[in-house]
Image (tube, rainbow, N blue to C red):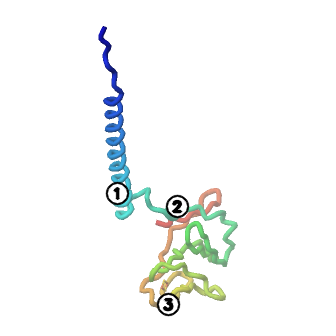
Amino acid sequence: MSQAKLSPEPINDVSRRRFLALLVHGGWAAALGVLVYQIGRFLGAEGLQTGPSPLVSAGNLADFPPETTTYVPEARAWVHHSTEALTSLDAVCPHLGCLVQQKEGGGGFRCPCHGSEFGIEGELERGPAERPLRQLEIQTQPDDTVTIRTA
Ligand code: FES
């Protein structure tokens, strides 16, 4: 009576080969994923960027009493409420991107990094910045919610 000889080696060889192939293919897939992610970041693809949302809720109209200037950190913006209207300025300095601060006494803004100064409406008063602060769209909704469009 002949009995078929069963050898475990061929099965182990196939499993080892298959395991190594999966390892190599998995490594290539991971490297490709990292490459695509880095290219996306380099090109500034939507969804990969971080930062404030373009439409930011700044609170309620009552948070901005008349004749005040208030910083809204979620929007990185200054909101000025004159007797007539709400206006909003980007707090990012157009020189190299520091956040401008309100001057003592509230008569405009000063950049702490290199000393650029801006008027209450964002107009450039002193460099090294070469442009005024960017005006942002601000709206009051029917329920008195204030929103700022940052982009
Ligand atoms: S970053 Fe504001 S003056 Fe340079």
Label pair 1/3, CB-CB below 8 angstroms: no
- Find residue 35 and name its label: 1
Q: Nearer the viewer, residue 137 or 13?
A: 13
Residue lying at 48% horizontally and 78% vertically, measured from the top left? 97
Q: Could you give the CA–CA distance between mark 2 and mark 1, rounded to whole angstroms?
A: 31 Å
Q: Nearer the viewer, residue 50 or 126?
A: 50
Query: Is residue 139 shown left or right of residue 22?
Result: right
The N terminus: image quadrant: top left
Q: Mark 2 packing: few (<14 Cα in 10 Å), some, or many (20+)? A: some
Disc 3 residue type (three-letter): Glu
Residue lying at 51% horizontally and 68% vertically, measured from the top left? 137
Which secondary structure, mark 1?
A: helix
Which secondary structure, mark 3?
A: strand
Rendered position, 86 above or below 31: below
Residue bearing the label numbered 3:
125
- x and y percentages locating residue 80 in the rendered image: 60, 76
Q: Mark 3 packing: few (<14 Cα in 10 Å), some, or many (20+)? A: some
Residue bearing the label numbered 2:
55
Q: Nearer the viewer, residue 115 or 10?
A: 10
Q: Which numbered disc, 2 or 1, marks the residue closer to the eye?
A: 1
Which secondary structure, mark 2?
A: strand
- x and y percentages locating residue 34 in the rendered image: 38, 56
- x and y percentages locating residue 128 in the rendered image: 45, 90
Disc 1 residue type (three-letter): Leu
Label pair 2/1, CB-CB below 8 angstroms: no
Residue lying at 54% horizontally and 78% vertically, measured from the top left? 99
Residue lying at 57% horizontally and 63% vertically, measured from the top left? 147
- Tell me which label, 2 or 1, sits earlier in the chain: 1
Q: Which numbered disc, 1 or 3, marks the residue closer to the eye?
A: 1
